Image (tube, rainbow, N blue to C red):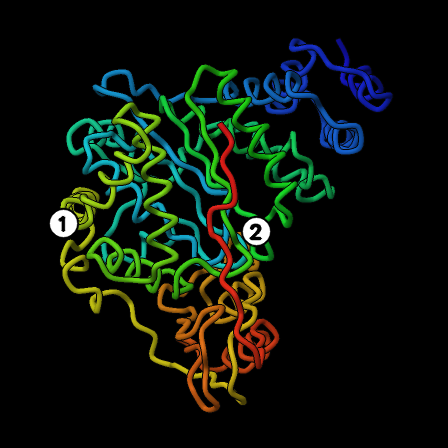
Amino acid sequence: MFALDLIIKKRNGGKLSKEEIRYFVNGYTTGQIPDYQASAFLMAVYFNGMDTEETLWLTEAMLHSGDVVDLSCIPGIKVDKHSTGGVGDKTTLVIAPIVASCGVPVAKMSGRGLGHTGGTIDKLESIPGFRTGLSSEEFVKNVKEIGIAVTGQTGNLAPADKKLYALRDATGTVENLSLIAASIMSKKLASGSDVIVLDVKTGSGAFMKTIDEAEKLARLMVDIGKGAGKRTVALITDMDRPLGNKIGNALEVSEAVDILNGRGPADLREVCVELAANMLFAAGKGDIEFCRSLAVESIEKGTAIKKLKEMVERQDGDPGVVDDTSKLPSAPFRAEWKAEEPGYIEKMHAEKLGMASMLLGAGRKHKDDVIDPSAGIELVKKPSDKVEAGETIAVLHTSDENRIPEALGVLKTAIGISPDPVPGKPLILGKVH
């Protein structure tokens, strides 16, 4: 078998066999297939695609290129959740404690952010002392003993994906459904959980810009999960506007704590309750309505916030942050942006708001950039809200006041005001299972 034969076969629109795909993934991971041939292979896939069966085989080959976490020693059905990413998306910080407090173990491996704002790991690291670099043994021990752990991805978890993603990024082959799905699902399957709930975002602040694209990706990932023997479900949620009122790492942690304390913005609470309910449902806790009630009850009775505090303490973070979020990093410089005219907030372009937040220091332009945990944007108004002239719409937070003018310039292009009332839009746009 030769790499050139596979390239030509896919270039001509042929279907690759399981053995051919495994040969390519193993060969590239070990360095036997050079970058120039792998680039040609990826471009052939980009233009001619892969069917569901090929995509499953690609996922399995990437999954088995490294370690697979064994959670079999943990009693019960273990659940995991993945979001395709968005602006203000701090749902893991809310959902994981809710689900764990309802007696379903949550084993979550998360990544760092590149772009708009930090990833879940960056957000958690804004908690003083919080340790995200758990060993596999610590990870399993924490899930077994307290029902929850959130850690960074191990160095040898789906190494084929890490290498292939870097090449896709450099060769313009990122935007292919099979390659996206295999990248996400290889890591989720390697994490070892029995249930995978996917939050597929769509809109201006998401990778999938249209509902049609989001549905296709959701269906493909659900089929892969089921093909691998995992209970898999996907929700399609709106990302035309930021989720919640805060964008940025410490800011988002404080908002997650608010939600778990029964406060905070209604949009974030709605999405979190729905995702948590689907995780509980897939774990066999009851019908979906009962699972929604369990999720709400965990907030109202305070069991979810206690579980978050327990996780923070177990991972060496300051548990006092959960009682008093003023202990989180706070930006020394702030700037308000106020409405120049009265009306109603018509749009909040999520991607541009994410970009403004990144310019303030909350995200990364490059992989090695250092994040400012205190930086970000606090939205005082959201779409459909009424605003008067001179009223504050957003507050910018940063440790470097020189960053404010450029971020403010982007912010102004992201928010539009209409003279007429603006109807609200649904947050949950679909479900694939």
Image x and y of residue 428, in percent: 47, 46
412 vs 122, nearest the viewer: 412
Q: Residues within 10 Å of mark 2 (few under 14, many from 20)?
A: many
Image x and y of residue 294, in percent: 22, 38
Image x and y of residue 3, in percent: 76, 18
Mark 2 sits on what residue?
A: 206
Residue type at numbered disc 2: Ala
Q: How many marks?
A: 2
Residue depicted at 60% across the width and 16% down the height: 57
Question: The N terminus lies in which quarter of the figure?
Answer: top right
Residue depicted at 64% across the width and 32% down the height: 179
Q: Which mark is on residue 15?
A: none
Residue type at numbered disc 1: Gly
130 lies above or below 250: above
Residue 229, by quadrant, is top left
Residue depicted at 20% across the width and 32% down the height: 147
Residue 324, by quadrant, is bottom left
Q: Which mark is on residue 302?
A: 1
- Mark 1 vs mark 2, CA separation in Å: 32 Å
Image x and y of residue 113, in percent: 48, 51
| Residue 182 visible somewhere in the drawing | no
190 lies above or below 1: below
Residue contact between numbered discs 1 and 2, judged by CB atoms under 8 Å: no
98 vs 426, nearest the viewer: 426
- Of circles 1 and 2, which is in front? 1
| Residue 428 visible somewhere in the drawing | yes
212 vs 145, nearest the viewer: 212
364 vs 184, nearest the viewer: 184
378 lies above or below 186: below
